[in-house]
Image (spheres, rainbow, N blue to C red):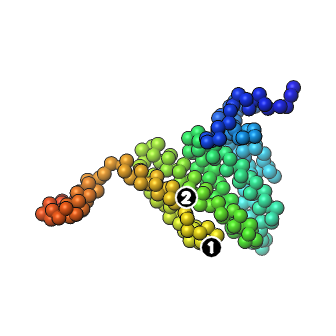
Amino acid sequence: MSDDIGRLLKRWKYHPNDVNVRIIDGQDGGKKLQMRIDLGLLQMELDGRPDGKRPHHFDSYLSYFEDRAKTALESGGATFSLSTVDCLRLQQEAIQFYHRYIALLRLGDYRRVVRDTRRNLRVFDLVHKYAKNQEIIWAFEQYRPYVLMMYVRAAASLAMASGGMDEAIRLIEKGIRAIERHYQKYSKHLGNEMVEVTLLREWLDELREQKPLSERERLQRLMDRAVQEEAYEVAAGLRDRLRQLDQK
């Protein structure tokens, strides 16, 4: 049997302006996630580590190093730190999870995207706490705004799917604040062009327009319009109605 995957690639054409993903039945009976790239394809597990490996019998290097850090803390005198090689392993593993949550977002599997983006944010936190080299820390921290944005997109989409428009808006606003704080902390490296914030604000504006107005919001808008048009008697009446709402 030939190992050439040419026939597979011919049956699945690559479209450069899209994220080309699909779920297939694996030979082990489970579902597999595939991503078509320009020179071939990636195949990933839907759960656990994307490549299916269990380093040191843990589900990931992240879990392994988190366990070592916890053990060191509980032992009292022991100290824990991440070496350059440790950080490289975490980085390579995080890239695997990045490929997977990009594919899962395209498929609308928001629950797994939330899981994988949270997981990569834990990587950043671990490296920030235990790595000694600031350049290595920055090699991870530079991607935090992007991963936060992806997490917010998935978490807010989940909220909207269950009818929680207010919760979706709250999650986006909270995410924007977190990204802005990160840009302030690393302003020398990141500059002031907060692309992730811009994208989330655009989405937030769209959701606010779709959200039905409450009685208070409707009256407030009418009063503001009346003031702008110098219809002060109408504005006074609307203000009285707003006060009545506040007293209920």
State whether residue 190 is above or below residue 19.
Answer: below
Which residue is outermost to the front?
16
Q: Which mark is residue 196?
A: 2
Residue 98, percent from left and from top: 67, 50
**Res 239 visible:** no
Helix, strand or loop under label 2: helix
Q: In the figure, 43 relative to 123: above or below?
A: above
Residue found at x 68% / y 32% = 13
What type is the residue that disc 2 sits on?
Glu
Q: Is residue 23 above or below residue 155?
A: above
Question: Residue drawn at (59%, 44%), measured in percent from left and top?
Answer: 105
* Dot 2 crowding, Cα within 10 Å, few <14, some 14–19, many 20+: some
The residue that disc 1 covers is 188
Q: Residue at x 72, y 44 (%)?
A: 50
Mark 1 burial class by Cα count in 10 Å: few <14, some 14-19, many 20+: few
List x then y, in percent, for residue 7.
77, 28
Distance from the alpha carbon under mark 1 to that under mark 2: 17 Å
Q: Quadrant of residue 237?
A: bottom left
Q: Sequence order check: which comes first, mark 1 or mark 2? A: 1
> 27 or 236: nearer the eye?
236
Looking at the rendering, in which quadrant would you find the N terminus? top right
Q: Residue furthest left?
A: 233
Q: What secondary structure is found at the residue carrying circle 1?
A: helix
**Label 1 is placed on what type of residue?**
Lys
The x and y percentages for residue 40 are 75, 38
> What is the total number of numbered labels drawn onto the structure image?
2
Q: Residue furthest top?
A: 1
